Each structure stands twice: as C-alpha cells, then as structure tokens.
C-alpha cells in the first residue's frame, strides 16, 4: 500500500512557489515507468524425490513482478531473464521517483489552496 511521505509545507508562500517550480522542472515521465514490486522467492519443485522436499535447500531465487490492481486483484508473473529483472527494477525506481515528486507537488498545491492562494502565479 502506498503511504505518502509528509512534506514540509510550513514555508512562506513564495518559497512554496519556488519549490513548486523546481519540482515541475524535475518531473518527467520515464517511458519505462512501472508501478509494481519485485519479489524474490525460493520454492519447491514438482519432483517428490527432490532434495527440496526432504529438508534440502529450495530452488531459486525466482523473481516475480507483482502489481496490485485492486483489493484482492494482483497481477503476478515470473521474470525469467536477468534483462527482464533489470528492466523491472529500473521501471519501478522511475515510477517511485515520479510518484514522490508528484506527491510533494500535490501537498504544496493543497497548502496553497488552504492559504486561499491561487495555484499559479507569483
Ligand atoms: Zn526440487
């Protein structure tokens, strides 16, 4: 579940506007953005006589991409190659950074509204 980081919006309106301009200059959508998590799993195989069923080490690690789409609705699949795993990691990081910038922008905009200031302008 996504939890917002709380940003300091106690600065002067001028400082908030300056921060807002900075955030806008930083915001760019990476084409490979991905809202998902990468999970590492070790598991047992289908062979009943394999060591993994008799106290031996399990197989893995296997990397799965999971994406929560709605409550109880999770899209999950195996990332088979290191290239897929790297692409997923980079996409997830890109999405996370964008989300952080947007969240701070949103908190500044809410604060400007609370102060009864226009959202744009100097
Ligand atoms: Zn096994």
Image (spheres, rainbow, N blue to C red):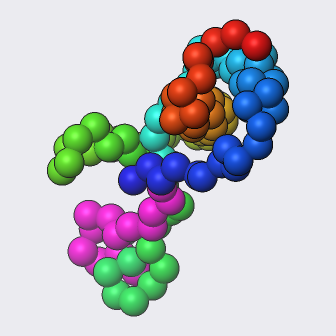
Look at the image and say whether residue 48 sits in the magenta stretch: yes
Q: Residue furthest front?
A: 116
Q: Which residue lies at the image location 48% right of the left edge and 79% below the top edge?
A: 57
Q: Residue furthest left?
A: 72
Q: Which residue lies at the image location 73% right of the left edge and 31% below the top edge?
A: 13
Q: Position of residue 17 (x, y in %)?
A: 74, 24
Residue 45 in the image: above or below residue 63: below
Along the viewing direction, whichever of 1 and 56 lies nearer the viewer: 1
From the viewer's perspective, tell me whether residue 51 is left or right of residue 34: left
From the viewer's perspective, tell me whether residue 43 is left or right of residue 72: right
From the viewer's perspective, tell me whether residue 21 is left or right of residue 105: right
Along the viewing direction, whichever of 89 and 33 lies nearer the viewer: 33
Along the viewing direction, whichever of 51 and 8 lies nearer the viewer: 8
From the viewer's perspective, tell me whether residue 17 is left or right of residue 32: right
Q: Position of residue 119 (x, y in %)?
A: 59, 18
Q: Quadrant of residue 93?
A: top right
Look at the image and say whether residue 58 sits in the magenta stretch: no
Residue 69 seen in the current view:
yes
Q: Quadrant of residue 112?
A: top right
Q: Which residue lies at the image location 57% right of the left edge and 33% below the top edge?
A: 115
Residue 99 seen in the current view:
no
Q: Residue furthest bottom?
A: 55
Q: Position of residue 74 (x, y in %)?
A: 26, 44
Residue 87 in the image: above or below residue 82: above
Q: Quadrant of the C terminus?
A: top right
Q: Which residues are drawn in magenta?
A: 38-51
Q: Quadrant of residue 111?
A: top right
Residue 100 in the image: above or below residue 17: below
How many numbered discs sit on the rendered protein? 0
């Amino acid at each position: 579940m996504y939890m917002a980081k709380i940003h300091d919006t106690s600065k002067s309106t001028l400082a908030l506007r300056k921060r807002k301009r900075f955030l806008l200059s930083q915001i760019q959508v990476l084409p490979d953005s991905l809202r998902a998590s990468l999970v590492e799993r070790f598991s047992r195989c289908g062979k009943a006589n394999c060591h993994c069923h008799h106290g031996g080490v399990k197989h893995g690690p296997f990397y799965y991409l999971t994406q929560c789409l709605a409550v109880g609705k999770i899209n999950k699949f195996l990332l088979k190659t290191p290239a897929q795993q790297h692409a997923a990691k980079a996409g997830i990081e890109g999405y996370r950074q964008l989300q952080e910038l947007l969240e701070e922008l949103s908190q500044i905009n809410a604060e400007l509204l609370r102060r009864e200031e226009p959202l744009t302008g100097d």
